[in-house]
Amino acid sequence: MTMKIINTLGPKETDSFKAAQFLASKEEVEIKLHDSFDDIYSHLDQLNGEFMLVPVAYRSAVSDSNWVDNNYKYLDQLSIVDTFFLPTMPMILVHNLHQDNQKIVLHPSTSAFLHDFDEDLVQDYVSSKPEALQKFLHGDYAYAIVSEEWFKKAMNKGIGDGRYETIQRFSPTMIWCLYKIIGK
């Protein structure tokens, strides 16, 4: 019997990787990380027989692609074999006190957290929360929504010198969908 190959979003700091590790704790699997879910969807024909793990909150940073539409769009190429739920890594809305450009970097799936935020922000979308953190720490954004754990690790490395404040913390639960890639 061949080992299951699960394709999902990387890098290893993503909730997608943690969800794939949850599956790997139940059976031996190989986890293949991709830069975006768009990358996986665009290469389904090359991944026939493998698996894809995607959160139902998935929204693309570069296209109008999302889980809801793709669940139907790829009906003839993807077959749901499992669903489960897990808490996400806690997320935070952070503010760079030294930047006032009203720009925020975030993954599009987290934009709903801004519904009660009074600021009129220019939203720049990226493919993962680790990418949002990297761009935020570069200093070009006043705000970001990132994983709290990875933000704290960056702060513990001496990045920031008190220039950041946490505005709000979010701890949602995510539903995950495991597909078998069946080809056409």
Image (spheres, grey):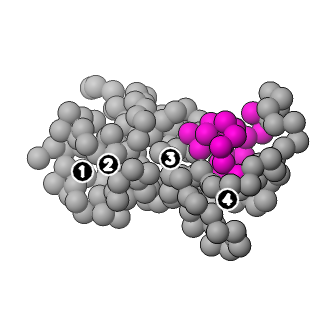
Q: Which mark is residue 102?
A: 4
On screen, 94 above or below 134? below
* Left or right side of 168 for 78: left
Sequence-wise first label, 2 or 4: 4
Residue 92 in view of the camera: no
Indicate the amino acid at tag 3: Val
Residue that mark 1 sits on:
78
The CA span between labels 2 and 3 is 24 Å
On screen, 78 above or below 173? above
Asked if residue 138 lies in the magenta stretch, the reply is: yes
Residue that mark 3 sits on:
126
* Left or right side of 98 for 135: left
> Are there few (<14), some (14-19), or many (20+) residues within 10 Å of tag 4?
some
* Tag 3 and tag 4, C-beta contact below 8 Å: no
Residue that mark 2 sits on:
179
Dot 4 falls on a residue whose secondary structure is loop
The CA span between labels 1 and 2 is 6 Å
The CA span between labels 4 and 1 is 40 Å
Indicate the amino acid at tag 1: Leu
Asked if residue 51 lies in the magenta stretch, the reply is: no
Q: Which mark is residue 125?
A: none
Dot 3 falls on a residue whose secondary structure is loop
Q: Residue at x 25, y 52 (%)?
A: 79
Sequence-wise first label, 3 or 1: 1
* Tag 1 and tag 2, C-beta contact below 8 Å: yes
User: Over which residues does the magenta segment extend?
Assistant: 131-154
